[in-house]
Amino acid sequence: MSLATEHIAFNIEKIRKDFPILKREINGYPLVYLDNAATSQTPQQVIDVIVDYYSNYNANIHRGVHSLSQEATEKYEQARISLQKHFNAKKPYEIIFTSGTTHGINLIASGFASILKEGDEILVSALEHHSNIVPWQMLCEKTGAVLKVIPMNEDGSLIYSAFEEMISEKTKIVFLNHVSNALGTINPIKDIIEKAHSHGAAVLIDGAQAAPHIKADVQALDVDFYVVSAHKMCGPTGVGILYGKEEWLKKLPPYQGGGEMIASVSFEKTTYADLPHKFEAGTPNICGGIAFGAAVDYMNSIGFEKIAAYEQELLEYATAKLLEIEGMKIYGNSKEKTAVISFNIAGLHPYDIGTLLDKMGIAVRTGHHCAQPIMDFYKIPGTVRASFSFYNTREEIDRFIEGVKKAKMMLS
Amino acid sequence: MSNIKEIQQEIVDEFAMFEDWMQRYEYMIELGKNLPLIDEKYKIDENLIKGCQSKVWVHAELKGDKLVFTADSDAIITKGIVAILIRAFSNQHPADIIEADTKFIDDIGLKEHLSPTRANGLVSMIKQLKMYAVAYQTQLN
C-alpha cells in the first residue's frame, strides 16, 4: 500500500473492485483511465440499479395507477431527495432533472429571454466550455443584451479585479464554471456570488467539473442556479440536474411544452404544473435519474473530503513527475485546482502524444477541450489533458509518466 | 514506375512485417518525418483539408500528364498517414487516381487503429486527393 493510501485511510483496492471497467485491457495493456473530466466510470452499485430498474420496475412515472408506475415514481422522487440532500437544497422541488449541464444552462438562458431588455449585461468567464457560451450569445441576439467576458490570468485563474470593475446595476446574470474543464482552476464562486448579488444580478454556476470533487452547498453559496451532469459523478450519461432557488424557478417561464409540465389544458389556456414538473416536460430519463441518485449516494459513502484529499495527492505526485520531463509545459497553475493536468511538450503535437498513449492502454483527452478561447489565450491548438479520479492509483500515474516519456522519445 | 495497385500492395506488405501497432506507429512517424514537404506558399487555408482535427495541407499540380501531391501537417502521425497516401497516389495519371480503390487502407488495418476523428480525417484526405484528380482530369481532356 502506498503512502498516500495509508495517510488518508483510503481503501483504494476495495474501491477499484467496484468498477468492472478497470479490469479491461486496451491494446494488450491494463487500462489506465485518465479521462475522468470527460466521463467518469460507473461502479457496480450504480450498474446494479440500472439493471434492477429495467428488470423489475420499468414504467412511466407520475400518472400510472398501477404498482410498477408507483414504484418507479417513488424511486425517482427518492433520487431527487438524495440529490437535494447532497447539494443541500432547501426543497426537493428545487432540483430539476435535466438531460445534463448543457440542458440546464439552456433552460436558464432561455428563461431569461423574458427578463432581459436591451442594454442589460451578461457576464461570462473566459474559462467557459465554449458550447456553453452559445446560449448566452443567442440570448443577446434575441434581447439586445450585451455579453461581457471576465478575463483570465496566465496561471488560468480569473482576474477578480476585472470582474469587480465589470459588474454593475446593468448586469442581470453572471455565468461561470465552478471548475474549468480545460485547466482545473477552481473559481472563487462564493465571492463572485456575493458581489453579483450586491448589484442585483443572478448567478448561474456550471458545476459539471466541480461536482465530482467538491460537495457544493447551494444554500451556503447562496447561488441562484447550479447545474451538473451525472456522467462526471459515476452516474450514467444523458442525465443531470438544475438546482434553482424556488423564487427564481417560479419566476422563470417553462422551457419546453409537453406532458408532465401542465396542470390543465384547454384550447384557450394552459395552466402550468407546480415545481419541479413545470420544467420537466415529457417522459424523463427515469432510469438515469434513479441511477444518478445512486451514484451520488455511492460517492458520499466514500466521502467527498477523502476523495478530494486523495485526488490532490495524485495531482501533486503527477505534476511533480511530469515536470521532470524536458520541454514540459503545464497550463493552469492556479493555487486552487482539481486533479486535472493540461500540458504540452515543446515541439510535439498533443494528438500524437494522445494517440501513442492510447496504444499503451492509457486514456487521456487531447485537443482544445471545447475551450477554444482558452487555447487562443495560450496560442496553442490544444493540450493533452490527464484528469484523475479517486479510483486512480500512483502506479497508474507511473505508467502514464512512462508512456509520456516513451511517446516523447518516439516523436522527437 | 509502379502502378497504384502495386504500390499499395508494397505498403500492405511493409505493414505486415511489423509485430505490433507500436512498431507500425514508429514506422508511420518515420514516414512522417520524411514526407516531401509542401512549399510554404501553399500552406494556406484554401489547401486545408476539412474534417481533420490536426491541420493538413495538400497541394496538387500537374507535371506532364501526372498529378503530383505535396503536403504537410502539424501532427507527425498525421504526416505519416499523409505520406502513405501520397506514396500510393502521387505521380500518377489523374484517371488512375480517380479509379483507384482504397481497400489497401483496410488491409493495413489502419482505420481501426485510428481514433474516430483521425479515421474521418483519413477519409477526408482520400476524398480530397480524388477531387484534385477529377479537377485536373478535366484540364487534361
Image: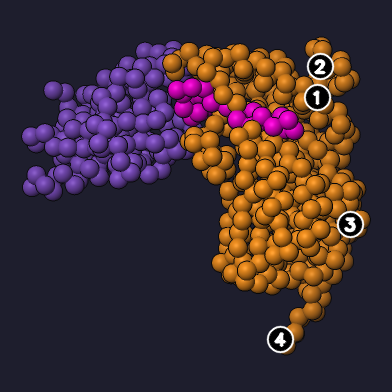
Chain colours: A orange, B purple
Q: Is residue A381 magenta?
A: no
Q: Chain of mark 2?
A: A
For marks 2 and 4, give the one nearer the viewer: 2
Residue that appears at 49% across and 29% down: A351
In the rendering, which numbered label is found on residue A4?
2
In the rendered structure, find residue A354 and report the number of the disc placed on it.
Answer: none
Asked whether disc 3 touches disc 2, contact meaning CB atoms under 8 Å apart, the reply is: no
> Mark 3 vs mark 2: which is more N-terminal?
2
Residue in front for this viewpoint, A160 or A295: A160
Q: Residues within 10 Å of mark 3 (few under 14, many from 20)?
A: many
Q: Residues within 10 Å of mark 2 (few under 14, many from 20)?
A: some
Q: Nearer the viewer, mark 3 or mark 4?
A: 3
Q: CA distance from mark 2 to mark 1?
A: 7 Å
Mark 2 vs 4, N-terminal side = 2
Percent across and percent down for residue A367 are: 52, 35
Query: Helix, strand or loop at disc 1?
Result: helix
Q: CA distance from mark 3 to mark 1?
A: 31 Å
Q: Earlier in the sequence, mark 3 or mark 1?
A: 3
Q: Which residues are magenta?
A: A331-354
**Labels 3, 2: one chain:** yes
For disc 1, the neighbor class at 10 Å (few under 14, some 14 to 19, many from 20) is many
Q: What residue is pinned by disc 4? A: A267
Is residue A374 shown left or right of residue B51?
A: right
Label 3, label 2: how far apart the Cα atoms are: 37 Å
Instruction: Identify the residue position indicated by label 1 in the image.
Output: A310
- Which amino acid lies under the numbered mark 3 shown in the image of this protein? Pro
Residue drawn where x is 56% and y is 29% of the image: A384
Q: Earlier in the sequence, mark 3 or mark 4?
A: 3
Residue A239 appears in view: no
